[in-house]
Image (cartoon, rainbow, N blue to C red):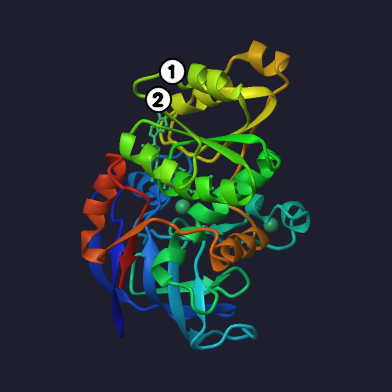
Amino acid sequence: MESMQAAVVTGLGDPLEVQDIEIPSPGPGQVLAKLVTSGVCHTDLHAAHGDWPVKPSPPFIPGHEGVGEVVSVGEGVTDIKVGDMVGNAWLWSACGVCEYCRTGWETLCEQQQNGGYTVNGSFGQYMLVDAKFAARIPEGADPVEIAPVLCAGVTVYKGLKVSEARPGQWVVISGVGGLGHVAVQYAKAMGLRVAAVDIAEDKLQLARELGAEVVVNASNEDPVQAIQEQVGGAHAVLVTAVHPSAFGQAIGMARRGGTIVFNGLPPGDFPAPIFDIVLKGLTIRGSIVGTRQDLAEAIDFYDRGLIHPKVSTRELSEINTVLDELAAGKVDGRVVLQY
Ligand code: NAD
Ligand code: ZN
Ligand code: ZN
């Protein structure tokens, strides 16, 4: 048997174990890629901890921002060949025939598979991808820089789209971590005015460098009051923060008629003010990653030089340290594993 190294979740809440496991072979419609990089998303931490109501079943390999070179191609794959660069995604596959798939909402498909959750992901030397759903990595792309686009990028790009904010309007990006710092960049590229909220001064500094006009540190001032006073309330609020308190605050930061989009997925609930939501005509919506088309568009923003994720590289053996740093809010931008 040919083997590879991978970081495996063996029990929910336990540290990952770097193990030697068999290299999978591609089934019909699949390709095998030798990984070059993989971003580490906060979702991987939720997965390893079993934070959500629908839990993954160990053993599994997390990771859904993987970039790799195709080394073998399964039966029936016609549009990907050996040597191509592909990426995996959270939306690893969908059924293609249900009401959601048929209406452009494949991200809501109940038969979907999720990279690094229901199928093995990119925290290893090789990964399988579904040829119909794999990201196409453009020629010349930096495999380290583009990795975060595959989840963080597409997620916030889609979140901004469904916020329906228009050029010239204000958007608050709440949480300037892996998702949020690219959200600032997509928002700018989409012609929006950006205010950023976080609880860490270094994250706010990064947001300023990336073009946020207003920054608010929610650990030492009331972000609702600050956003209402400084921008008159935001037309849209995109929440990527990992604490439930940011979700209630997001509602207070919106302008009348505004839309609040939730991307962040911390476990828990928050109280929502019925009176404000009704009287101010607010829209609150969740948004989960993006379709293949959203992903292609998000990658195209990168390809045109409009987006530059801030990345730092680490090795697979350091995965538990990386996850601890993520849990402690100590990661600036995105950590990308390099194989
Ligand atoms: P991250 O750890 O890189 O960033 C989280 C940020 O939130 C940090 O900057 C932190 O300082 C900030 N934060 C914490 N508490 C806050 C508060 N009270 N107010 C404002 N900011 C606060 O995480 P990430 O990889 O960017 O992921 C963020 C969340 O988005 C996770 O819950 C993840 O699971 C989720 N996610 C959702 C989707 C989706 O499709 N909806 C996709 C990817 C990730
Ligand atoms: Zn993710
Ligand atoms: Zn479907």
Q: Horizontal and vertical percent for residue 167?
A: 69, 43
Residue drawn at point x = 64 percent, y = 83 percent: 79
Residue under pointer 1? 222
Q: Horizontal and vertical percent for residue 136?
A: 57, 73
Q: Horizontal and vertical percent for residue 262?
A: 56, 36
Residue 94 quadrant: bottom right
Quadrant of image for the N terminus: bottom left
Residue 96 quadrant: bottom right
Residue under pointer 2? 218
Residue drawn at point x = 48 percent, y = 43 percent: 54
Q: Residues within 10 Å of mark 1 (few under 14, many from 20)?
A: few
Residue drawn at point x = 36 percent, y = 79 percent: 23
**Amino acid under label 2?**
Ala
> Is the CB atom of the residue marked by disc 2 within 8 angstroms of ligand 1's nearest atom?
yes
Along the line of sight, the residue nearer the viewer: 330 or 216: 216
| Label 2 – label 1 distance at C-alpha | 6 Å
User: Can I make out residue 120 in this image?
Assistant: no
Q: Horizontal and vertical percent for residue 10?
A: 28, 56
Residue drawn at point x = 27 percent, y = 39 percent: 328
Residue 241's label in the rendered image is none
Quadrant of image for the C terminus: bottom left
Confirm or deny contact between disc 2 and disc 1 (CB under 8 A): yes
**Amino acid under label 1?**
Asp
Tell me the SS state at disc 1: loop
Q: Is residue 252 above or below residue 188?
A: above
